[in-house]
Amino acid sequence: MNFKSFVTSPRLEHNAFLALLVAVTLAFVWILQPFGGAVFWGAVIAIVFAPIQMRLLRRWPRRPTLAALATLSLVVLLVVLPLTLLTGMLVKEGAALYQRVQSGETNFVRYFEQVVSVLPAWLHDLLEHFGLTDLKELQARITDAVGRGSQMIATYVYSVGQNALDVVVGFFVMLYLAFFLLRDGASLTRRIRAAVPLEPEHRRQLAEKFITVIRATVKGNILVAAAQGALGGLAFWFFGIQGALLWAVLMGFLSLLPAIGAALIWLPVALYFLVTGAIWQGVTLILYGVLVIGLVDNVLRPILVGKDTQMPDYLVLISTIGGMAIFGINGFVIGPVIAAMFMAVWDLFGTAREAAAAEPPVDDARP
């Protein structure tokens, strides 16, 4: 092929267009990167609340803007305002706990000393062998950890204060994007599906899987977290444990990890009750944690998450932990979505290979 035929060949034009497509897409992602979290949650809000938008559109078929505004108002009332109030209460509770630790009213070393004093001799010797019974060293470690934690919190608060404008802008970008995705989401989805270079059936299955997993993950995990956090906080309040709201939020956050989440908070407290002689409190909290808090996880999560995503619990757990390790708080959605798409793509690939193997071979012999 000579140079003239090469520069005018359709193959070169095709490759150049693909390169331009990739370059422009990467540049667009780079531009959105400063508001990546806002864009991500704007899209998640639109996907989760799309059924409400469609229901309102059936009532107001010629007013998509009004339907999107009404849906967005529900988002603000049901999600944004409660989270804002909860965050304010949590900051106040965390500050009060920090003050109690600094003043010595809450002394974790004393709690540890009470536990160590009632341990059997063999377990005490084992802890001593690993240097875990040196209370002075433990006090120093806790003091250092509290100091570093307080410094980290102060730095974070200062950073939030300095970047308050970015936070406000990101918040309004999220709501702004969610509004247009709610209003124009159906047409945008059709254009994306048409542009994806896959077979129509594969496009449909992957799109349905993507939307289903996001809705199930967000709604299921949030409902489970809210239920487990509320039940755990109620138990801590009943037993007179200081900072019940703070521990409730921590249990709700940790409940994003299936099976083991909330137990990381209530189980050590129950064991502390047992080893310090508060037998009925410890037994009651264990029974309550297993039969009530654990039942929420064992009943609601398979119904709200596993049933729709069709993923086993161990895969949900691993993908959630991995997603949060890489993407932060956004990872509790991104991780399971990636895992579900991985399973869906390989399932489509296996199905296509089985269909190809079942087809009769083509006879290329010529007469």
Image: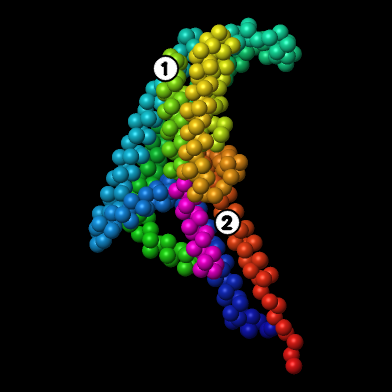
User: In the depicted view, which residue is nearer to us: 107 or 223?
Assistant: 223
- Magenta: main secondary structure: helix
Q: Which residue is mark 1?
A: 238
Q: Residue at x 36, y 53 (%)?
A: 51
Mark 2 and mark 1 residues within 8 Å of each other at the beta carbon: no
Give how far across and how far down residue 33 sits, in percent: 49, 49
Location of residue 142 by image quarter: top right
Amino acid marked by disc 1: Phe
**Residue 112 has which mark?**
none
**In the image: residue 65, left or right of residue 330:** left
Chain part drawn in magenta: 198-217
The image position of residue 333, as x and y in percent, is 50, 45
Q: Amino acid at mark 2?
A: Ala
Measure the C-alpha gap from mark 2 to mark 1.
46 Å
Q: Which residue is mark 2?
A: 344
Residue in front for this viewpoint, 67 or 286: 286
Q: Position of residue 88 (x, y in %)?
A: 37, 28
- Residue 158 against residue 196 in the figure, above or below: above
Question: Quick one: label 2 or label 1, which is nearer the N terminus?
Answer: 1
Q: Secondary structure under badge 1?
A: helix
Residue 110, compared with residue 13, is above or below; it is above
> Is disc 1 surrounded by few (<14), some (14 to 19) or many (20+) residues within 10 Å?
few
On screen, 112 above or below 153?
Answer: above
Q: Count how many numbered circles sit on residues in the image.
A: 2
